[in-house]
Image (cartoon, rainbow, N blue to C red):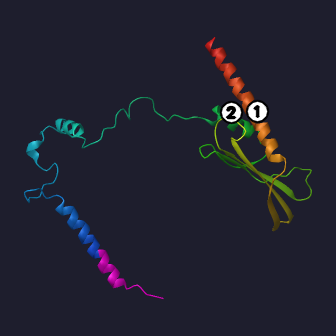
Amino acid sequence: MKHINLKKLGFFKNCLFILVISTFILSCKGPDGKFKIPGSDARKFPADPKLRVKKNLEEGRGFKLNNVFDGPKGGVFDFASSNELWRASLDTIDFMPLLSVNYSGGIIVTDWYSSEESLSGESVKISIRFLTNEIRSDALDIKVFNRKCNNVSNCIINQVNDELAPELTKQILKKATLYKQEAKEKDNKKID
């Protein structure tokens, strides 16, 4: 195994630092060999601060916060309730406890759920990932996981590939379509 000599490494870092600083300083030299720092000649700038700011902005040397502090306070929010697919998904699995819901990330993950009738130690977990906001058959990626436990520390978790995921997709798409139709009818009533 080869060891790194820390003294040589420190020397290399110092040389690199000196090289970078020298390059920076030499870049301030003008063609006549004199150091010229941009904006350092006070004769070329007006004495009035407002005129200096105006000139700097015109030359692109500053920035301006256009109307940042004007207008209504607060942010603009697109709430998840306006997305029919999102609402339909939450309504379809509303009987299950939710572990993670992230609208901006487009994912819903339920916690482990078992019905009262399930005495065998089985529980189910569902994750719904949104691939698009459009109501169509490939808009959702639904995964269903099954957990069977013999005791608290002995559990087996498997992804289930049965009819539950397609059935959930079908129910969610139906509800989302109904929500979209209701929204259109409501908009049409507002126009009339």
Q: Residue at x 26, y 67 (%)?
A: 20
Q: Which residue is mark 2?
A: 84
Q: Earlier in the sequence, mark 2 or mark 1?
A: 2
**Magenta-span inclusion, residue 5:** yes
Direction from residue 135 to residue 117 in the image, left or right: right
Q: Give the secondary structure at mark 2.
A: helix
* Viewport quadrant of the C terminus: top right
Above-or-below relation of 107 to 187: below
Q: Which residues are magenta?
A: 1-13
Along the line of sight, the residue nearer the viewer: 192 or 26: 26
- Marks 2/1: CA–CA distance: 8 Å
**Magenta-span inclusion, residue 95:** no
Along the line of sight, the residue nearer the viewer: 59 or 62: 59
Q: Give the secondary structure at mark 1.
A: helix
Q: Quadrant of residue 121?
A: bottom right
| Residue 166: percent from left, percent from top | 80, 44
Q: Which residue is mark 1?
A: 175
